[in-house]
Amino acid sequence: MSTPSPLEKLEAAFSDTSGVYVNQGVDEKTYFADLVSDIRSHISVPFEINAQVTPPGFPDREIGSMVSGICVAHSAGYWLVYQPEQDTFYCFWGTNPAELQAPGIFGSALYCWSA
């Protein structure tokens, strides 16, 4: 049995809407479909990427430490990263891929992309 690729994990994660805030009066189904469409339009060939943990940080990582994962989508300073050891998604921020920040946004792919 083979391990799913990061893109397969991403595709499977599209049904997880946990943590995603939807404004009052917005149709949830449409909002989630738009998020999925936006992520799909920014999917990249997966590659490893690192970021420095910044406040508020993650419960299991020190501020200033480095965190790495597999980038699966990015757009205008937003990097959606799959972290296989935690089996979760992170959001990294920054325009320079050598100097990204990880401010503690993690969970479902849709939550990270909407943050």
Image (cartoon, rainbow, N blue to C red):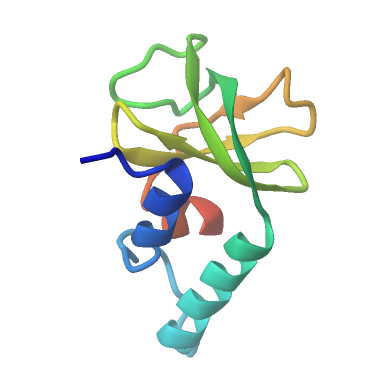
Which residue is pictured at 59% across the width and 24% down the height? 49
Closer to the camera in the image, 55 or 8: 8
Left or right: 79 as drawn, with respect to 65: right
Query: Split into 4 quadrants, where in the image is the N terminus?
Result: top left
Closer to the camera in the image, 91 or 38: 38
As displayed, is residue 108 above or below residue 96?
Answer: below
Which residue is pictured at 34% across the width and 66% down the height? 17
As displayed, is residue 88 above or below residue 68?
Answer: below
As displayed, is residue 107 above or below residue 20?
Answer: above
Q: Residue furthest left?
A: 1
Residue 46 in the image: x percent, y percent? 58, 38
Closer to the camera in the image, 80 or 45: 45
Count of labels in the image: 0
Residue 57 in the image: x percent, y percent? 43, 26
Residue 3 in the image: x percent, y percent? 29, 38
Residue 82 in the image: x percent, y percent? 44, 38
As displayed, is residue 88 above or below residue 102?
Answer: below
Which residue is pictured at 29% across the width and 31% down the height? 86
The image quarter containing residue 40 is bottom right
Which residue is pictured at 57% across the width and 25% down the height? 48
Q: Residue furthest front?
A: 1
Closer to the camera in the image, 51 or 48: 48
